[in-house]
Amino acid sequence: MDFFRFLFSRKFLKHLLIAIGITVVLVWTTLQSLSWYTKHNDHLIVPDFRGLYIQEVLGNPENRNYQFSVVDSIFDADKPSGSILSQDPYPGSKVKKNRMLYLTITTMVPEKTTMPDLRDLTLRQAQTMLESAGLKLGRLLYIRSFDEDAVQNQLFKGRSIMAGAEIDKGSVIDLTVGMGAKASEASLDSLGADSIMGANNIN
């Protein structure tokens, strides 16, 4: 009985409230200290550096709160050399001051690839293999052949190129293609020995 009387006594309740108050103050102080130490609300929004030149980014004093590391370089014939292709973290990300940003830029020297063997393949198959090798389909030169829509020859800068040859990625490859039965003798005569058509005619 004395124990329960003590639990409900004014003295015990007073000390209990004091202990709870001290605990709350200690927890709040700890959380505030951690927030200050980790700079919880102090962050930067990562700009979009894609398309800019790496020298331009490094030389801009507005970017002094970031560190930069070029982790890869890729040849892209459609992008100027030295421009930024991708970045990590992505634009719009929230980061701490002096955060390292990892960049991929375009290189001046194109990568090499191996010319595939496209002969006797259909146009669709040939286009797929060219894309897989990092090459581009150029003009289509239609010639008399019983193999309709089959590749007869592969050309680079107007000359035949053998399968297995080393070639720059992004190079344009022209193809000679058989007309088969698609054209009658009359249409062949009107076309002449061959007919050049755009690569966009492939469906």
Image (cartoon, rainbow, N blue to C red):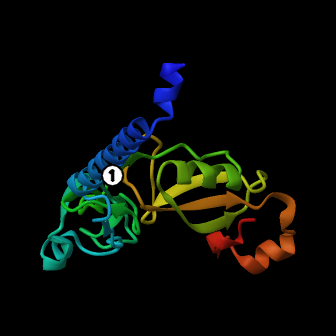
- Which residue has dot 1 on it? 28
Which quadrant of the view contains residue 142?
bottom right
Which quadrant of the view contains residue 83?
bottom left
Tell me what residue is drawn at x 62 percent, y 67 percent.
140
**In x, y percent, where is residue 48?**
36, 72
- Decide if residue 144 is in sight here: yes
Q: Nearer the viewer, residue 190 or 101?
A: 101
Q: Nearer the viewer, residue 36 or 102?
A: 36
**In x, y percent, where is residue 33?**
23, 52
Q: Nearer the viewer, residue 198 or 7?
A: 7
Within-10-Å neighbours for mark 1: few <14, some 14–19, many 20+? few
Q: Amino acid at mark 1?
A: Trp
Q: Nearer the viewer, residue 30 or 65?
A: 30
Callout 1: SS: helix
The N terminus lies in quadrant = top right
Task: State whether residue 137 is above or below residue 1.
Answer: below
**In x, y percent, where is residue 195?**
67, 73
Taking the image as shown, residue 53 lies to the left or right of residue 24, namely left
- Decide if residue 195 is in sight here: no
The C terminus lies in quadrant = bottom right
Task: State whether residue 130 is above or below residue 19.
Answer: below
Task: State whether residue 120 is above or below residue 49.
Answer: above
Taking the image as shown, residue 145 lies to the left or right of residue 58, namely right
**In x, y percent, where is residue 104?**
31, 57
Tell me what residue is drawn at x 87 percent, y 69 percent.
184
Report the label total. Answer: 1
